[in-house]
Image (tube, rainbow, N blue to C red):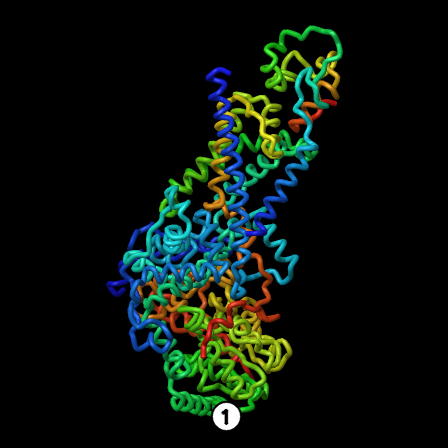
Amino acid sequence: MNKILLLILLVALAGALTIACVPEKPVKDGHGELAVTIDREFTAPVTHSPLDWWQTRHFQTVNSGDIKEKDCLYCHKVERSCNNCHSYVGVRKIK
Amino acid sequence: MPEKFADFPATTLTWRKTNGGLAIPVPEMDEGIAAAMVCHPSKAKDMKPIALPTERVPHWQARAVEKLRELLEKYRGLSVYLDICAQCGACADKCQFYLGTGDPNNMPVARANLLRKVYRYYFKRAEKFLGGDAEPFNERVLKEWYTYFYQCSECRRCSVFCPYGIDTAEITMAAREIMACIGVATKYVTEVVAKVYERGNNLGIPAPAWIDNCQFLEEELKTETGKDIRMPVDEVGADVLLVMPSADNFANTDTMMAYGKLFYALGISWTTSTYANEGGNFGLFLNYQNMKKVNKRILDAARQLKVKRVIWGECGHAWRAAIYTNTLNGPMDFLDPPHPVHICQFTADMIARGAFKIDKSANDDLLITYHDPCNVARAGSLLEEPRAMIRATCNKFVEMPRNTIREKTFCCGAGGGLLTDEIMPIRMAGGKPRAEACRSTGANYLAVPCAICKAQLPEVMKHWKVDARVGGVHDLLSRAMVL
Amino acid sequence: MNDAAMIWNLLAALLIGFAYLSAFVFIGGLLLRIALYLKTPVPLKIVQTPGPKSAPGVVARIAGDVLIFPNLFQADKLLWLGAWIFHACLFLILVRHTRYFLYPVPELVIDWQNISVYAGFLFPIPALYLFWRRLASSRVLYISGLPDYITLILLTAIASTGMLVHYFARVYLVDVKAFTLGLVTFAPVQPPQHPIFIAHFLLVCSLLLWFPFSKLMHAGGVFFSPTRNQIDNVLYPRYVNKWNEEVRVD
């Protein structure tokens, strides 16, 4: 029984340590280190609306119709407005 | 065919061979068809000497559950196997008793489930809560156990096909041990163990008769070979104590004479013991204590006779227990290593060293095939030695289909304490796959290094009308040896 | 705060509580079972013939059992194929799911993005085959109990809801990740308000709760099967049974 308590303690400790390393989730115009920002002063295209639909679904639209990946990169900088999110959820990075 | 055999599906078609394997027809399931085939119950006079209750103990249900708890704490195998079976059914059509009878409780997984449902009821309530089959240990379950755990020959063929290697034999052994501790066992097994304690061997041959038989065999050998080949008994200071199945002294005398010729040719002094003239360990079918006690006699005899080595004869259950001798009764370091030794290992080694003059043509009238006894091959790892012996002594050797030999061998149908006449239909049903495999080779001599097989297989061959004689592996050496 | 928000907060709290409970039961139950197996002695060395003669041989045998199910292959080729695809899909899906619990996400998990999605789509086929087989073969039908069906249904339901939230009724992954990462770092946040995701999550928790008490334990127990995990050297050196001395025979 002692061993099991020790194990639980270790798990909790590991958890507490990871808290320190985990960043805030990426949010558009947010504050954390992963915050999503758009540099250029363009208005968002109509395809991006509503925003939460676009955030959830854009992978099914990009590269499967008129919009190509490179088109995104006119406004989006890969590090600050693509890959911070992509690496957070573990999907393919944009090159 | 006697009427009582008519209960089981008896296809008359010859089983086909398909690219090296045997196409084994799986019978339709027929629930309860083997339920009536029950061994005779033990008698009080036999239970007493083997330290088991002479009648059903009071509070037997609670006692059985207590015993199950004890076994779960003592055997990791049991505990793991009861937990992890995924009920995939891969083993379902692998047991000769299912293939022979079609009774679903003879599918290894269903057999194990008979114990598993009791385990679930008392020890794994979560699974019971979600609709898992669970039942308290009651009269009905006990009857099922007594029927079907004594229709398992503990041969472990199913284990070879289980993705986790679940050993149904261990589950059967546990169930039998639980039954034994509440006073439920079969007449055949308990009688045999009691005889060992009384007379030293399973057949109950008294010492004078043993000596008589040995003298008779010496005379036979004299007539046959013209040499003075000895069959020593109780000789202190011999090099080797040979522990054979007592049936060799009495029924399979060709094998016994072969041992005599073998040691004569090698010039090694040997002896048998009237205290321990039995290798076959029937304690294996009851509980750990009796297994240990039966085995202990052999090492005691070795000490009394001051031998250098103990060699186990052509016997399956003897070898299954023998490989545990060091654990059960050891350390065995008063003997010369390696130990323990099986006679087939010993002889194959001697043949390899060129110790005998062999005329293979003496066996040319025979087309030989080899039956791997479950306990010698699957439990005892002797796959190559007997084959090497046959190849060295015979010109005509043919293997049975590959899915019926070596570690996938079928049991003869009477191991594990089933060699008793009241369940003859089960024995014949269980022997069928072996009979068909033998038929498919066309062999006329079935070599087998096991006394149970030697008693069972002739009846099986007769019943399924396969024209093959059954005999020992050493018998072949004996025929081919030039003295 | 309005009523709907309060109810939602309550539900979220319950969900988080249930998640911790099931994770605790899963890990605790698994460890207890394994501790029990380890504590229980192996009195006699019973190894499946032909057995490995060395420790690396044992490792290879167990690795084989876990990866390619050789015994099952000998027993039943079709069942082997079904079971192998079933487990391979499960494995790929599980590996891919580690991305919800790790930060940064390992490269391998990112690279397996496509193959894991295929596995997700393929999974129902072997699952349905295994389910169908339980009903279609009289022998397997005879041995199948309610837990066998429940386990298959549960896994299929988890896979289907998973594919739904991945493709057809997508959930916003950033919210999912924030939620799961919150759980593993003991700093829980609100789950995404997405009914199918909640269902998926609840089903997974139920599976975890069920795991240590069911036949799913074969995933842990396969490493402890005495016929498979021992060196085949029963004759030498002497194998010692701890409780042998307790059994008196004189």
Compared to residue C170, the image places residue B159 above or below, namely: below
Instruction: Identify the image quadrant of the N terminus of chain B.
Output: bottom left
Instruction: Identify the image quadrant of the C terminus of chain B.
Output: bottom right
Mark 1 is surrounded, within 10 Å at the Cα level, by few (under 14), some (14 to 19) or many (20 or more) other residues, namely few
Compared to residue B239, the image places residue C90 above or below, namely: above
Residue B334: image location, x then y, percent = 59, 82
- State the residue position of label 1: B226
Residue B371 shows up from this direction: no
Helix or strand or loop: what does disc 1 sit on?
Answer: loop
Compared to residue C127, the image places residue B247 above or below, namely: below
Task: From the viewer's perspective, tell me whether residue B29 is left or right of residue C222.
Answer: left
Task: From the viewer's perspective, tell me whether residue B434 is left or right of residue B347.
Answer: left
- Closer-to-camera residue (B393/B97): B97
> Which quadrant holds residue C177?
top right
Q: Amino acid at mark 1?
A: Gly
Task: From the viewer's perspective, tell me whether residue B414 is left or right of residue B273.
Answer: left
> Which quadrant holds residue A17?
top right
- Closer-to-camera residue (B112/B220): B112
Residue B358: image location, x then y, percent = 57, 80
Q: What's the residue at 41%, 67% (across, down)? A: B416
